[in-house]
Image: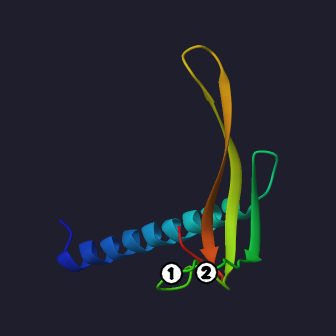
């Protein structure tokens, strides 16, 4: 029979391995988001938005360096017609990941 300290040590070791795997998975996810190919592209640029006449505050991304991914989704309706929709999503703001 094992002692409580042996169990705690093994538990801490497993938790450390899990955290290491989570960190590695996150790094791979971020690398995948920054990859540009024929299906999806990543762009990062400083965005400027015109302030509307009656806006109380400026746009959230105004003057910030925003990284976005762009891709195209294709949908087919019940009649067999296909429709393409261009999509985009902000994933980085000033070098900080937001996804």
Q: Quadrant of the N terminus?
A: bottom left
Spatial separation of the CA atoms under disc 2 and disc 1 = 7 Å
On the image, the x and y values in percent for residue 3 come to 19, 74
On the picture, is 43 further left or further right than 54? Answer: right
Q: Residue at x 61, y 66 (%)?
A: 90
Residues under numbered marks 2 and 1 in contact, where contact means CB atoms less than 8 Å apart: yes
Q: Residues within 10 Å of mark 2 (few under 14, many from 20)?
A: few
Q: How is the image coloured?
A: rainbow
Residue 45 appears in which quarter of the rendering? Answer: bottom right
Q: Secondary structure at mark 2?
A: loop
Q: Is residue 71 above or below residue 55?
A: above
Residue 26 appears in which quarter of the rendering? Answer: bottom right
- Total count of labels: 2
Q: Is residue 84 above or below residue 45?
A: above
Residue identifier under label 1: 55
Which of the pair 97/63 is nearer the observer?
A: 63
Residue 98 appears in which quarter of the rendering? Answer: bottom right
Residue identifier under label 2: 51
Q: Residue at x 71, y 77 (%)?
A: 47
Q: Residues within 10 Å of mark 1 (few under 14, many from 20)?
A: few
Q: Residue at x 58, y 77 (%)?
A: 52
On the image, the x and y values in percent for residue 8 come to 26, 76
| Residue found at the far top of this picture | 79
| Residue found at the far front of this picture | 53
């Amino acid at each position: 029979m094992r002692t409580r300290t042996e169990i705690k040590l093994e538990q801490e070791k497993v938790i450390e391995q899990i955290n290491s795997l989570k960190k590695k998975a996150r790094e791979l996810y971020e690398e995948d988001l920054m990859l540009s190919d024929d299906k999806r592209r990543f762009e990062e640029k400083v965005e400027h938005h015109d302030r509307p006449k009656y806006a109380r505050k400026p746009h959230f991304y105004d003057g910030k360096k925003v990284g976005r991914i762009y891709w195209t989704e294709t949908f087919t309706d019940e009649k067999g017609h296909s429709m393409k929709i261009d999509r985009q999503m902000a994933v980085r703001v000033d070098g900080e990941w937001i996804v």
